[in-house]
Image (spheres, rainbow, N blue to C red):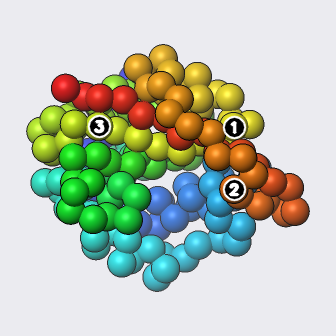
């Protein structure tokens, strides 16, 4: 399937929250343990700057208001200005659109667009058990930069986190 993307709007926030919440039960892609709400995500959404830290939503061609996933360019680490050349990517899909090429589309577009945002480096953290996501990022030039043992606790089970990144220059 072919996918498209566009800049997220406030009207997309409910769909983004629904996508976030769909990832919680599997305990494989997020450290959120309880469902999030639109109200709890407003400040995050409003902090996104289209010129430097945009949030995109994926959609099918001809259906721009049907959100199939999202990618956000997040501030890196603690958001101090010295880190402005690096973005922490967040990439999540609606369950009905997993395994159809949407993640690869959004990741390719993020890599291509990053220099226009003043970025030199993209990074993200992935649960070590999420081999599918690790393969996706590796297939797009990301390398493992570190492994953090048992830094996440999901229902009493320690989860290792793999830190991956790549240059976009």
Q: CA distance from mark 1 to mark 3?
A: 21 Å
Identify the residue at horizontal 15%, vertical 45% (top origin): 117
- First in sequence, mark 2 or 3: give its number: 3
Q: Label 2, secondary structure: give it.
A: strand
Asked whether the residues under the numbered discs 1 and 3 touch, taking CB atoms below 8 Å apart as contact, a structural biologist would say no
Identify the residue at horizontal 77%, vertical 61% (top origin): 153
- Relative placement, left or right, of 164 versus 51 is right
Where is residue 132, by image quadrant?
A: top right
Q: Residues within 10 Å of mark 3 (few under 14, many from 20)?
A: many
Task: Give the residue at mark 3.
Answer: 121
Q: Label 3, secondary structure: give it.
A: strand
Q: Position of residue 74 (x, y in %)?
A: 35, 56
Q: CA distance from mark 2 to mark 3?
A: 23 Å
The answer to whether 37 is drawn above or below residue 147 in the figure is: below
Quadrant holding the C terminus: top left
Q: Which mark is residue 151?
A: 2
């Amino acid at each position: 399937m072919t996918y498209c993307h566009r800049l997220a709007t406030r009207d997309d926030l409910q769909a983004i929250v629904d996508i976030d919440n769909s990832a919680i039960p599997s305990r494989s892609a997020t450290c959120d343990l309880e469902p999030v709400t639109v109200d709890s995500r407003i400040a995050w959404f409003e902090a996104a700057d289209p010129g430097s830290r945009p949030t995109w939503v994926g959609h099918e061609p001809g259906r721009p208001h049907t959100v199939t996933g999202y990618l956000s360019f997040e501030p890196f680490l603690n958001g101090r200005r010295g880190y402005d050349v690096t973005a922490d990517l967040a990439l999540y899909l609606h369950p009905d659109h997993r395994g159809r090429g949407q993640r690869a589309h959004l990741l390719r577009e993020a890599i291509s667009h990053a220099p226009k945002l003043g970025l030199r480096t993209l990074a993200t953290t992935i649960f070590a058990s999420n081999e599918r996501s690790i393969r996706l990022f590796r297939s797009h030039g990301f390398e493992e930069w570190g492994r953090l043992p048992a830094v996440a606790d999901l229902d009493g089970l320690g989860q290792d986190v793999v830190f991956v990144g790549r240059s976009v220059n």
